[in-house]
Amino acid sequence: MDAHQFAKDKQVVIFELDDVLFPEKDYLLQVYYLFAQFIEYSEQKSAQAILDFMRLEYESNGAEQLFEKTAIQFDLADSYKHNFDLLHQNARLPLKLLLFKNMLAFMQELVVDRKKIFIVTAGNPIQQLNKIKQTEWNGLEKYLTVFFVDELEKPKSEIYQNLLFNNNLSPKDALVVGANKFDEAQSKLINIPYIVSPKIYR
Protein backbone atom coordinates (compact mmCIF):
# COMPACT_ATOMS: atom_id res chain seq x y z
CA MET A 1 0.00 0.00 0.00
CA ASP A 2 1.18 3.52 -0.79
CA ALA A 3 2.25 5.16 2.44
CA HIS A 4 0.45 8.34 1.43
CA GLN A 5 -2.90 6.54 1.72
CA PHE A 6 -2.29 5.79 5.41
CA ALA A 7 -1.98 9.44 6.35
CA LYS A 8 -3.94 11.40 3.75
CA ASP A 9 -6.71 12.31 6.23
CA LYS A 10 -4.42 12.68 9.28
CA GLN A 11 -2.88 15.79 10.80
CA VAL A 12 -0.23 14.09 12.94
CA VAL A 13 1.73 10.86 12.67
CA ILE A 14 3.41 9.36 15.73
CA PHE A 15 6.39 7.02 15.41
CA GLU A 16 8.38 4.78 17.71
CA LEU A 17 12.12 4.73 17.05
CA ASP A 18 13.65 1.23 17.28
CA ASP A 19 12.69 -1.14 14.47
CA VAL A 20 10.23 1.45 13.17
CA LEU A 21 12.44 4.19 11.77
CA PHE A 22 15.66 2.14 11.73
CA PRO A 23 16.78 -1.33 12.84
CA GLU A 24 17.73 -1.33 16.52
CA LYS A 25 20.46 -3.86 15.72
CA ASP A 26 22.27 -1.22 13.64
CA TYR A 27 22.89 0.66 16.87
CA LEU A 28 23.57 -2.30 19.15
CA LEU A 29 26.04 -4.05 16.85
CA GLN A 30 28.10 -0.87 16.64
CA VAL A 31 28.05 -0.63 20.45
CA TYR A 32 29.28 -4.22 20.63
CA TYR A 33 32.01 -3.44 18.10
CA LEU A 34 33.23 -0.52 20.23
CA PHE A 35 33.11 -2.63 23.39
CA ALA A 36 35.11 -5.40 21.73
CA GLN A 37 37.71 -2.86 20.62
CA PHE A 38 37.91 -1.50 24.17
CA ILE A 39 38.46 -4.98 25.61
CA GLU A 40 41.14 -5.75 23.05
CA TYR A 41 42.97 -2.57 24.08
CA SER A 42 42.51 -3.23 27.81
CA GLU A 43 42.95 -7.00 27.98
CA GLN A 44 44.76 -7.95 24.75
CA LYS A 45 41.91 -10.29 23.81
CA SER A 46 40.78 -10.58 20.20
CA ALA A 47 38.21 -7.90 19.36
CA GLN A 48 37.05 -9.91 16.35
CA ALA A 49 36.43 -13.03 18.44
CA ILE A 50 34.49 -11.03 21.03
CA LEU A 51 32.42 -9.26 18.39
CA ASP A 52 31.65 -12.50 16.56
CA PHE A 53 30.47 -14.08 19.80
CA MET A 54 28.32 -11.09 20.75
CA ARG A 55 26.76 -10.82 17.31
CA LEU A 56 25.87 -14.50 17.18
CA GLU A 57 24.49 -14.46 20.72
CA TYR A 58 22.46 -11.32 20.03
CA GLU A 59 21.05 -12.67 16.78
CA SER A 60 20.18 -15.99 18.44
CA ASN A 61 18.92 -14.88 21.86
CA GLY A 62 18.65 -11.09 21.93
CA ALA A 63 20.43 -8.52 24.09
CA GLU A 64 19.35 -9.94 27.46
CA GLN A 65 22.31 -10.86 29.69
CA LEU A 66 24.69 -10.38 26.77
CA PHE A 67 27.46 -8.84 28.86
CA GLU A 68 27.28 -11.66 31.41
CA LYS A 69 27.50 -14.31 28.70
CA THR A 70 30.42 -12.53 27.06
CA ALA A 71 32.20 -12.09 30.40
CA ILE A 72 31.98 -15.82 31.07
CA GLN A 73 33.11 -16.72 27.55
CA PHE A 74 36.16 -14.42 27.62
CA ASP A 75 36.89 -14.32 31.37
CA LEU A 76 36.14 -10.61 31.78
CA ALA A 77 35.91 -8.82 35.13
CA ASP A 78 32.44 -7.76 36.26
CA SER A 79 33.73 -4.17 36.45
CA TYR A 80 33.59 -3.98 32.65
CA LYS A 81 29.78 -4.02 32.88
CA HIS A 82 29.97 -0.30 33.67
CA ASN A 83 31.84 0.37 30.43
CA PHE A 84 29.39 -1.80 28.50
CA ASP A 85 26.36 0.07 29.89
CA LEU A 86 27.99 3.46 29.39
CA LEU A 87 28.69 2.72 25.74
CA HIS A 88 24.99 2.06 25.19
CA GLN A 89 24.27 5.59 26.35
CA ASN A 90 27.05 7.66 24.84
CA ALA A 91 28.73 5.65 22.08
CA ARG A 92 30.12 7.67 19.18
CA LEU A 93 29.13 5.37 16.36
CA PRO A 94 31.53 4.63 13.50
CA LEU A 95 28.57 4.81 11.08
CA LYS A 96 25.42 6.91 11.21
CA LEU A 97 22.09 5.16 11.65
CA LEU A 98 20.12 5.08 8.41
CA LEU A 99 16.34 5.26 8.22
CA PHE A 100 14.48 2.46 6.49
CA LYS A 101 14.06 3.68 2.90
CA ASN A 102 10.30 3.29 3.04
CA MET A 103 10.08 5.28 6.28
CA LEU A 104 12.32 8.04 4.92
CA ALA A 105 10.07 8.38 1.86
CA PHE A 106 6.95 8.31 4.05
CA MET A 107 8.25 11.00 6.41
CA GLN A 108 9.35 13.19 3.52
CA GLU A 109 5.81 12.98 2.14
CA LEU A 110 4.42 13.97 5.53
CA VAL A 111 6.61 17.08 5.57
CA VAL A 112 5.54 18.04 2.04
CA ASP A 113 1.89 17.60 3.07
CA ARG A 114 2.49 19.73 6.21
CA LYS A 115 1.65 16.91 8.62
CA LYS A 116 3.12 17.07 12.12
CA ILE A 117 5.63 14.34 13.01
CA PHE A 118 6.10 13.11 16.58
CA ILE A 119 8.42 10.46 17.97
CA VAL A 120 7.28 8.83 21.22
CA THR A 121 10.02 6.45 22.23
CA ALA A 122 10.46 4.07 25.16
CA GLY A 123 13.78 3.05 26.69
CA ASN A 124 16.61 4.84 28.43
CA PRO A 125 16.17 8.52 27.46
CA ILE A 126 19.92 9.18 27.24
CA GLN A 127 20.39 6.17 24.98
CA GLN A 128 17.41 7.04 22.80
CA LEU A 129 18.63 10.63 22.43
CA ASN A 130 22.07 9.33 21.47
CA LYS A 131 20.45 7.30 18.70
CA ILE A 132 18.50 10.32 17.46
CA LYS A 133 21.64 12.47 17.38
CA GLN A 134 23.47 9.87 15.30
CA THR A 135 20.74 9.20 12.78
CA GLU A 136 20.96 10.51 9.23
CA TRP A 137 17.67 12.38 9.04
CA ASN A 138 18.21 13.87 5.58
CA GLY A 139 16.94 17.24 6.77
CA LEU A 140 13.88 15.86 8.57
CA GLU A 141 15.25 16.61 12.05
CA LYS A 142 13.82 20.14 12.13
CA TYR A 143 10.32 18.75 11.68
CA LEU A 144 10.47 16.27 14.57
CA THR A 145 9.09 16.62 18.10
CA VAL A 146 10.32 13.92 20.48
CA PHE A 147 8.84 12.56 23.73
CA PHE A 148 10.78 10.14 25.95
CA VAL A 149 8.37 7.75 27.67
CA ASP A 150 10.70 6.78 30.51
CA GLU A 151 11.51 10.41 31.26
CA LEU A 152 7.85 11.44 31.39
CA GLU A 153 7.01 8.34 33.47
CA LYS A 154 3.61 7.99 31.82
CA PRO A 155 2.13 5.23 29.67
CA LYS A 156 2.27 5.82 25.94
CA SER A 157 -1.50 6.05 25.74
CA GLU A 158 -1.48 9.04 28.10
CA ILE A 159 1.30 10.71 26.14
CA TYR A 160 -0.69 10.19 22.95
CA GLN A 161 -3.77 11.64 24.64
CA ASN A 162 -1.90 14.73 25.84
CA LEU A 163 -0.39 15.19 22.41
CA LEU A 164 -3.85 15.21 20.86
CA PHE A 165 -5.23 17.56 23.53
CA ASN A 166 -2.37 20.05 23.14
CA ASN A 167 -2.92 20.16 19.38
CA ASN A 168 -6.73 20.33 19.56
CA LEU A 169 -7.06 17.04 17.72
CA SER A 170 -9.26 13.96 18.02
CA PRO A 171 -7.98 10.36 17.73
CA LYS A 172 -9.16 10.12 14.12
CA ASP A 173 -6.78 12.96 13.21
CA ALA A 174 -3.73 10.91 14.24
CA LEU A 175 -1.90 7.77 13.19
CA VAL A 176 0.55 5.69 15.24
CA VAL A 177 3.30 3.76 13.44
CA GLY A 178 4.84 1.03 15.59
CA ALA A 179 6.42 -2.41 15.44
CA ASN A 180 4.93 -4.41 18.30
CA LYS A 181 1.72 -5.46 20.00
CA PHE A 182 2.34 -3.17 22.96
CA ASP A 183 2.28 -0.02 20.84
CA GLU A 184 -0.81 -1.30 19.07
CA ALA A 185 -2.56 -1.87 22.41
CA GLN A 186 -1.60 1.59 23.68
CA SER A 187 -3.01 3.17 20.53
CA LYS A 188 -6.27 1.24 20.74
CA LEU A 189 -6.80 2.37 24.34
CA ILE A 190 -7.60 5.84 23.03
CA ASN A 191 -8.83 4.78 19.58
CA ILE A 192 -5.94 6.10 17.49
CA PRO A 193 -5.51 4.18 14.22
CA TYR A 194 -2.37 2.05 14.24
CA ILE A 195 -0.23 0.49 11.54
CA VAL A 196 2.84 -1.74 11.65
CA SER A 197 5.85 -0.11 10.00
CA PRO A 198 6.66 -3.02 7.63
CA LYS A 199 3.27 -2.44 5.98
CA ILE A 200 4.51 0.92 4.72
CA TYR A 201 6.32 0.68 1.45
CA ARG A 202 6.78 2.61 -1.77
Image: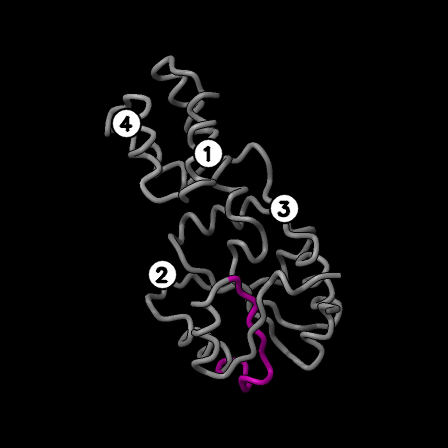
What type is the residue that disc 1 sits on?
Answer: Leu
Indicate the position of residue 69 as horizontal and vertical percent values.
Answer: 31, 33
Is the residue 186 above or below the residue 171 in the image? above
Question: Which mark identifies residue 98?
Answer: 3
For mark 2, give the secondary structure. helix
Give the Cα distance between marks 1 and 2.
32 Å
Q: Which residue is mark 4?
A: 72
Q: Point out the stretch of residues depicted in magenta.
A: 165-179
Q: Quick one: label 3 or label 4, which is nearer the N terminus?
A: 4
Q: Quick one: label 1 or label 3, which is nearer the N terminus?
A: 1
Give the Cα distance between marks 4 and 2.
33 Å
Asked whether 71 falls inside the magenta stretch, the response is no
Give the Cα distance between marks 1 and 3.
22 Å
Q: Which residue is mark 1?
A: 56
Residue at image point 69% right, 51% down? 138
Looking at the rendered image, the quarter that the N terminus falls into is bottom right
Is the residue 168 above or below the residue 152 in the image? below
Q: Which residue is mark 2?
A: 151
Viewed as shown, does residue 150 lie left or right of 168?
left
Count residues near mark 3 (Cα–Cα under 10 Å), then give few for <14, some for 14-19, many for 20+: some
User: Circles 1 and 3: CB distance less than 8 Å?
Assistant: no
Q: Nearer the viewer, residue 183 or 166?
A: 183
What type is the residue that disc 4 sits on?
Answer: Ile
Asked whether 175 falls inside the magenta stretch, the response is yes
User: Circles 1 and 2: CB distance less than 8 Å?
Assistant: no
Indicate the position of residue 76 as horizontal and vertical percent values.
Answer: 28, 23
What type is the residue that disc 3 sits on?
Answer: Leu
Count residues near mark 4 (Cα–Cα under 10 Å), then give few for <14, some for 14-19, many for 20+: few
Give the Cα distance between marks 3 and 2.
25 Å
Indicate the position of residue 29 as horizontal and vertical percent values.
Answer: 49, 36
